[in-house]
């Protein structure tokens, strides 16, 4: 297939790009040029920011387009105008955060109500789904919380490998709420193993598929697993979500609209069509991230988030 990825160097898009090339697809990436070190060998690269200038795509057509960058309604409307009649199928990368909160059950499937005014990111993603499904021969994919070897997942958006450094230094790690909420963390290689075959699957136009790990953990267990892999005890500090939101409304929105609600996305729909790849447990995936970090000790993380955790942890005593 002749594939176009808008994006391709992020946590899950990069794993998918590599697998597409391994499977013999002809892949073009449209990139802004900010992470060129992650461009997989064999991919054709066009440089440009589709939000500002789509001229690099002028006159080009593809069997399949995947846009990893659509965040707002205007992005979706632009893609409808740009790709209508120029691709046989369009894959929109949405999110499992689109479901209306609170959830009726943590075990949520694609038929659950969507629309999430508690978090503007999630609500916009839900609105984009409707625009693209009605405007293009589209498929919607809702990833769960995914991470790659060059990332470190946590409930504290933006902190990344700062969590690792806090555990190693014996500093407190803030857990939202009582830490008993259920969550899934999906390694990018497992996501790619389900997503890439879906690109050429028959009978998927107009459908919605969510992709997530089958392993369900509590937030407390997630951080304990990190400590076990690091060989260090973890100093967990439980802080009510409402208190975190009071101190930092932006971080609070990601919790109140998503991570503060137990969610275990059911991926049986996609796994019923695609042979499931080898599962990657969080312990295994996190150890891959630690190995990557050892090779890249200079990898930055958000120092502002690190200091914010200090303030939240200190204020909870």
Image (spheres, rainbow, N blue to C red):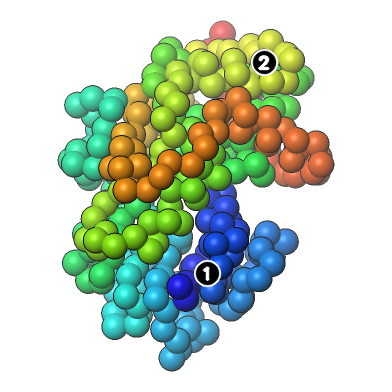
Label 2's element? Answer: helix
Residue drawn at point x = 32 percent, y = 48 percent = 273
- Residue shown at 45% from the left, 86% from the top: 60
Quadrant for the N terminus in the image: bottom left
Mark 1 falls on what kind of element?
A: loop
Q: Which mark, by number, is residue 13?
A: none
Horizontal side of 104 relative to 304 (left or right) equals left
Residue situated in front as seen by the camera: 36 or 138: 138
> Residue 48, position in %: x, y?
56, 77
Q: Earlier in the sequence, mark 1 or mark 2?
A: 1
Residue 103 left/right relative to 51: left
Foreground: 114 or 194? 194
Left or right, 104 with respect to 53, comes to left
Query: Counting other residues with Cα less than 10 Å from the Cα at mark 2, is it few (<14), some (14-19), or many (20 or more)?
Result: few
Q: Decide if residue 256 is in sight here.
A: no
Where residue 25 is drawn, which disc sits there?
1
Q: Is residue 293 placed above or below 87 in the rendered structure?
A: above
Circle 2 residue: 228
How much space separates mark 1 and mark 2, taking CA atoms?
A: 40 Å
Residue 39, by quadrant, is bottom right
In which image quadrant can residue 158 be found?
A: top right
The x and y percentages for residue 224 are 59, 15
Indicate whether 313 appears above or below 274: above
Pointer 1 local density, CA inside 10 Å: few below 14, some 14–19, many at least 20: some
The answer to whether residue 298 is left or right of residue 210 is right
Residue 11 at x, y percent in the picture: 57, 49
């Amino acid at each position: 297939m002749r594939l176009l990825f808008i994006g391709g160097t992020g946590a899950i898009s990069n794993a998918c790009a590599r697998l597409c090339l391994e499977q013999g697809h002809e892949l073009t990436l449209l990139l802004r040029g900010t992470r060129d070190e992650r461009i997989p060998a064999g991919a054709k690269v066009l440089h440009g920011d589709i939000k500002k200038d789509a001229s690099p795509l002028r006159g080009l057509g593809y069997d399949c387009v995947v846009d990893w960058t659509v965040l707002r309604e205007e992005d979706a409307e632009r893609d409808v105008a740009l790709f209508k009649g120029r691709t046989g199928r369009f894959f929109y990368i949405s999110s499992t955060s689109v479901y209306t909160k609170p959830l009726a059950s943590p075990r949520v499937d694609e038929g659950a109500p969507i629309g999430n005014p508690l978090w503007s990111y999630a609500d916009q993603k839900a609105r984009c789904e409707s625009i693209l499904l009605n405007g293009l021969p589209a498929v919607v994919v809702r990833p769960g919380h995914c991470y790659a070897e060059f990332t470190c997942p946590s409930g504290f958006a933006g902190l990344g490998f700062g969590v690792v450094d806090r555990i190693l230094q014996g500093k407190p790690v803030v857990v939202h709420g009582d830490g008993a909420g259920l969550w899934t963390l999906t390694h990018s290689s497992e996501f790619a193993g389900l997503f890439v075959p879906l690109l050429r699957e028959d009978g998927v136009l107009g459908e919605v598929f969510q992709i997530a790990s089958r392993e369900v953990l509590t937030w407390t267990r997630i951080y304990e697993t990190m400590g076990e892999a690091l060989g260090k005890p973890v100093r967990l500090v439980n802080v009510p979500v409402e208190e975190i939101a009071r101190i930092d409304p932006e971080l609070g929105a990601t919790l109140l609209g998503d991570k503060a609600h137990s969610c275990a996305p059911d991926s049986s729909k996609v796994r019923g069509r695609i042979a499931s790849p080898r599962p990657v447990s969080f312990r295994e995936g996190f150890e891959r991230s630690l190995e990557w970090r050892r090779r890249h000790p200079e990898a930055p993380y958000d120092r502002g988030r690190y200091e914010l955790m200090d303030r939240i942890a200190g204020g909870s005593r």
